[in-house]
Amino acid sequence: MSPRTAQTSAPVLDTLAERWSPRAFDADHSFPEGALRGIFEAARWAPSANNSQPWRFILARRGTEHFTAIEETLAGFNRMWAGSAGALVVNVAEVANAEGNPQPWAEYDLGQAVAHLTVQAHAEGFHVHQMGGFDRDAIRAAFNLDARFEPVSVMVIGAIGDAEQLPEPLRERELAPRTRIVLEDLFIARD
């Protein structure tokens, strides 16, 4: 068992217990064309309300114009480390369908798709770190997104790197023990 494996209060799948969100990524690792197909296939098969599948992605591998465009929208703290990953992905919710009808569950369903993707990525030996610190309007402009598409988060995907390469305080956060609130505190009510 890795020192990063979650100490759970009930048994969970190994892939879930071992999954974590690093900031240290291997800058020498790259994804060839098609290497990420399996993780997006996992996202494709996530459940969604009315089978609407209201998730879309902008995938950019390091070294491309799209990668640079996404990286430039990241908040300063995230920009310090995210550029060493093999890929950046913008997670986009289709908040209205092609006919203009609202899809109020779109962000929830996108979250499910991203969760499936994250677990599949870990099972394939990669790590994912999700970020909310980015400029949504800049993403919208850079990729000419229609108003019915809402950028929700950005993911970093890659092979794990050495925490020692990170500046403080990122290194300290990378090496800190994993913690979660206790299971019982998750419930507002339960019988």
Image: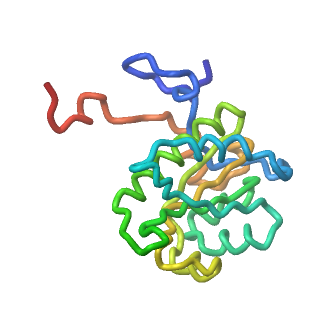
Residue 6: give x, y in percent of width and height: 49, 27
What residue is at 53 percent from the left and 69 percent from the top? 134
Q: Is residue 102 above or below residue 29?
A: below
Q: Residue furthest front?
A: 99
What residue is at 70 percent from the left and 39 percent from the top? 126
Seen from the viewer's position, the closer of residues 71 and 147 is 147
Seen from the viewer's position, the closer of residues 25 and 158 is 158
Residue 158: give x, y in percent of width and height: 72, 47
What residue is at 14 percent from the left and 34 percent from the top? 189
Q: Is residue 59 above or below residue 142?
A: above
Residue 4: give x, y in percent of width and height: 57, 29
Q: Is any atom of residue 136 visible in this view?
A: yes
Q: Is residue 39 left or right of residue 13?
A: right
Determine the image quadrant of residue 69. bottom right
What residue is at 73 percent from the left and 67 percent from the top? 67
Seen from the viewer's position, the closer of residues 33 and 178 is 33
Q: Is residue 12 left or right of residue 160?
A: left
Q: Is residue 69 above or below residue 5?
A: below
Quadrant occupied by the N terminus: top right
Quadrant occupied by the C terminus: top left
Q: Is any atom of residue 161 visible in this view?
A: no
Q: Is residue 67 above or below residue 180?
A: below
Residue 90: give x, y in percent of width and height: 60, 62
The count of marks equals 0
Q: How is the image coloured?
A: rainbow
